[in-house]
Amino acid sequence: MKNEENISSRRDFVKKMGATGLCAIALPHLPLSWLIEDKFEIGATFILWGYGPDNLEPALTDLSKLGYHSFETFGNVIQEYDENRGGIESLIDKTGMPITSAFCMTDVLDPSKRKEELEKLVKWSKLLKKAGGKVVEYCPSSINRKDYNYKDHKKNIVESMNDYAKAVTDLGLVCALHPHTGTPIETEEEVYFIMENVNTEYMKFGPDVGQLEKGGADPVKICNDFMSLIEHVHLKDYEGGDNGYLGYAPLGEGQVNIREILNQLEKEKTSMAGAVMFELDYDGKLDAPYSPFKAAKISRDYLVNLGYKFV
């Protein structure tokens, strides 16, 4: 997260004087993002190493060596650590990697499940808060999208998400919606529907730009349209095909306009509750071209070239 007490005088001056003109006069060879000294910190999710609790420590060990600032894991992984592994706080202390967020999924289509799902989400949220986290990266549970039409479920989707987001907010955390392929909120139309109808006093936005691209949406446009609601970001590239990463790619090796999305964030937002989280999906069936460490390093180096700093 940006340090709000250290928003540099250069940034203030750029905004007051007019960024475009100042850049052209003072530093014509550099993009505006280079003038912003206090950039967002870059964390990472752990799924490049796998999806279970046994994958978390190897992920944090590598991410710490590479200088990523913080991490995100799943709500159920935090629960597993709490119930059977002495708490996730011990792993945080061991690796020196603080937790920022937890990815949490609940059902939004069946109202008979809502009470149980809400209790599960509250449990995960409390464990996240106890560990020092700040953001629930919320995603509706996966579904079979064959014959699915969100218009048949609008009432349940909106009401359930409002209930879930309010419960998270009441605990002192931020709830940010993560659209995801294979869930009730995948397409551009579905993203706009939910963000224009959900109660945004409680539900904020946590876009995964690679998921949006894969789902056929325009991540640059969506981020721009909902910029005021963005509190967390999954920074993911996408190239398509069977590549060992479910079609995703290390940053800079796909087709997502990562640079423009980051420029938007840096120009329009001075702070977020969460962070910008590098993410790359582990396939599990096909061999990837890089080791997890190497793919995370490629992505880190891409961001370093854009002016981002690592620990």
Image (cartoon, rainbow, N blue to C red):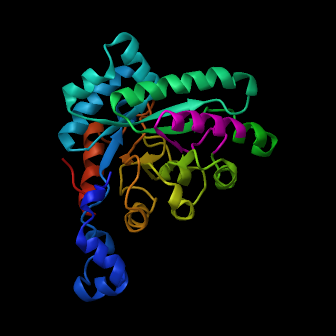
Query: Going 42% across and 56% down the picture, which residue do you hit?
Result: 254
Q: Nearer the viewer, residue 181 or 92?
A: 92
Dividing the picture into quarters, in which one does residue 49 lie?
top left
Q: Which is nearer the eye, 209 or 281? A: 209
Expressed as whole percent of the image width and height from the top left, the position of residue 73 reads 40, 32
What x and y, as percent, mark residue 115? 66, 22
Q: Which residues are magenta?
A: 159-185
Q: Position of residue 297 (x, y in %)?
A: 25, 46
Q: Quadrant of residue 309?
A: bottom left
Q: Is residue 90 left or right of residue 217?
A: left
Residue at (26%, 61%) from the top-left corner?
A: 38
- Compared to residue 125, the image places residue 180 above or below, namely below
| Apparent side of residue 10 relative to residue 191 in the rendered image (left or right) | left
Residue 274 in view of the camera: yes
Q: Based on the picture, tell me whether residue 65 belongs to the magenta stretch.
A: no
Q: Residue at x 23, y 85 (%)?
A: 26
Compared to 296, does 25 lie above or below?
below
Residue 51 can be seen, yes or no? no
Q: Is residue 245 left or right of residue 104?
A: left
Tell me where residue 174 appears, x and y as whole percent: 48, 42
Is residue 192 depicted above or below 31 in this figure? above
Residue furthest top in the image: 84
Is residue 166 highlighted in magenta? yes
